[in-house]
Image: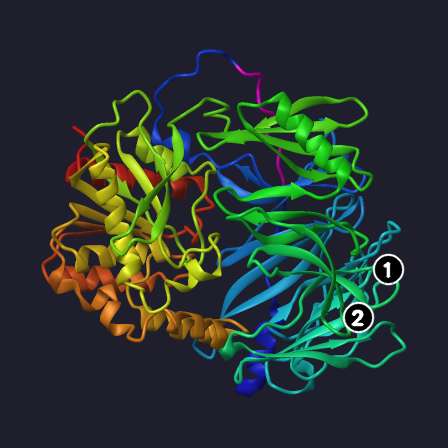
Amino acid sequence: MNMRTMRAVLLGQGLALALAQSALAQAPAATPGSPALHAAADFAALPFVEEPELSPNGEWVAGLFGVDGQRRVCILPLFDPKARRSCLLVPDMAEAHGLEWVNDDNLILHLTALQQIEGKGWYVSRAYALNRNTNKITKLLSGLNGQSADKVVWTARDGSPIVEIAAQNSIYEEPEFWPAVYRVNVESGVSTKVQSGAGDVMNWMTDGAGTVRLGYGYDDSRRKSRVLYRRTAQESLRIIDRADDRKREEVIDPVAFLPEGDHGIVVHKDDKDRSALFEVDLTTQKDVRAIWTAPEGSWIASTLTAGDRQTVLGVYLNGRERDRVWLDPALAALQAALAKSVSDKRVHIVSFSRDRQRMLVQIDQADTPGTLYFFDTSEGMLHRYAWMNEKLRSEALNPVRAVQYKARDGLEIEGILTLPKGREAKHLPVIVMPHGGPWWHDTLNYDYWAQFLASLGYAVIQPNFRGSTGYGEAFERKGEGQLGLAMQDDLNDALKWVADQGIGDAKRACIVGASYGGYAAMWGLARDPDLWRCGISISGVASLRREVDDMGDASINGHTNQDSWKRMTPDFIAVSPINAVAKIKAPMLLVHGKMDVTVDHNQSVSMSVRMKSAGKHVEFVSLPKADHYFTREADRLALLQAMERFLKVNNPVD
């Protein structure tokens, strides 16, 4: 077998899934008088469910459930306790990155795995269908050999098991490299091609009838974009827009097609640099009217579109809180009524049936993991379905608030501050905890790491340093060229602010973070060796050059991703912790899972070896089953216990 054939076969093999029956325990009734103190195991408990989705008829819920200490994709009944409960076991070195109902009986699961092809890691994505009646698992488009083969672009609305999926059939730059669109029966697996691939087009978009209307072309080597468009299936696709990514140009990006004609709904900035929804004439790219504008300080991260693919029901906002705003009048009125009924907490309409009568509603706060409820608009009552964390329930834990401080150059920075409950907020030991990404930001949402560390007696501040998302494009660009420099200054200035406020003791501070935050923890010890008493890097990046090189191999748009990193610093070597071990004075804890497909486990292995060779104080906890997000309860517990032991020795509370 030649190497080219071997690569195609490996990609075609896909991922193996196992099916297991699981009796998920129903949450018992709440009991008063929950204990005030909690152990690491209480915080490490997996959420009851993440990303819950109601079936179209509102009788079933699918999601990523915590089952026997592991995250599994499950379908559970809402009403019948005797009905079958099916759960999928996701294989090692793979991540579930989304699920969606096709009809009342069939669910699609999206999986991404890291496969070794010719000695390099490739992210390979596939779609699987699960029938809740038969428990049959069907790998969709199983005969294709491309890297990406799971993008659902249309779902039938008549209850039939039909979807359209855009998928590649080759990893070589030949005609089948460009994704075609296939109409697929998810029960039988039978598929028919409805749109052939087109040069440079990596993404397709359909209207509500399933007609492919628009294609996004992108040449990753030249960083050039173009948009192809047509009104009907009988017309030829024509170019309506072009852009050069290197010049930061953007092509038109509709989120929905309006019925009849050439108008669509598009998210872009208005003339006051505010994020807004517009009706746009797609043939001219001219705005027809403004539909909705985000409030100051918030940005539209994504939209929530109805199944007809032409009605925008709401938006997700990026800001201090990642929140939904409903534009549909009925949903907006219901959201307001629910919020008024529980004014001391936050209410989120999480998912709803096709007729929007049955809903899942989550009620939470930054200091509590929250509760999931079932709500029927015809009845008007909330029924508790489950505590998100059975051990913590709805107890108010450690108080959380957003704070603002000025960096040394005057830039306004926001951070999330969590303080120990029941302790006077004076001269506390401090944990500075930068987020991952770095294109991300921490919000006023429940964070089990911050809550656990605060429960031990630490003041925890999570700075949204320059370069973070959620504060507008100008703020994000301030991180360019500043990785390891001003971005790191912002973390130090967060510690200074906590000390200046009298809240924390700057001489008893540790820096803790994961992924990019793990990089920042390692780099903080090397760059500012006299500032920190210790550092904890979780799934961190020790060698930036190696990480960026790996990224170019693994992703389809790897060159573009590499460009984003290269804009952050002109010299990866100069700001990589692994090259500055000699400067480190404080003890370091490294925690990394061998099943991490986002940051290579060898990043921490190499840092540990380099530290030990230099005679530095380093502890390395390597977890054989842990992934990047610690989706196994045992791994979460091992992580929290390792942090607790390390901090007790190197930065004790008392």
Secondary-structure class at tag 2: strand
> For the residue carrying disc 2, how many other residues have a C-alpha within 10 Å: few (<14), some (14-19), or many (20+)?
some
Query: Cα distance, mark 2 to mark 1?
Result: 12 Å
Residue 573 position in % (x across, y down): 25, 73
Residue 213 has which mark?
2
> Residue at position x 71%, y 26% from top?
81
What amino acid type is highlighted by mark number 1? Pro
Q: Is residue 351 left or right of residue 257?
A: left
The image shows residue 264, relative to residue 536, as above or below, that is below
Magenta region, main secondary structure: loop
| Magenta highlight range | 21-30
For badge 2, the amino acid type reads: Arg
Q: Is residue 582 above or below residue 317?
A: below
Q: In x, y percent, where is residue 41?
A: 38, 31
Q: Does the segment drawn in magenta span residue 8?
A: no
Circle 2 or circle 1, nearest the eye: 1
Q: Which residue is mark 1?
A: 259
- Could you say where residue 379 lies in the image, as x and y percent from the top left? 79, 22
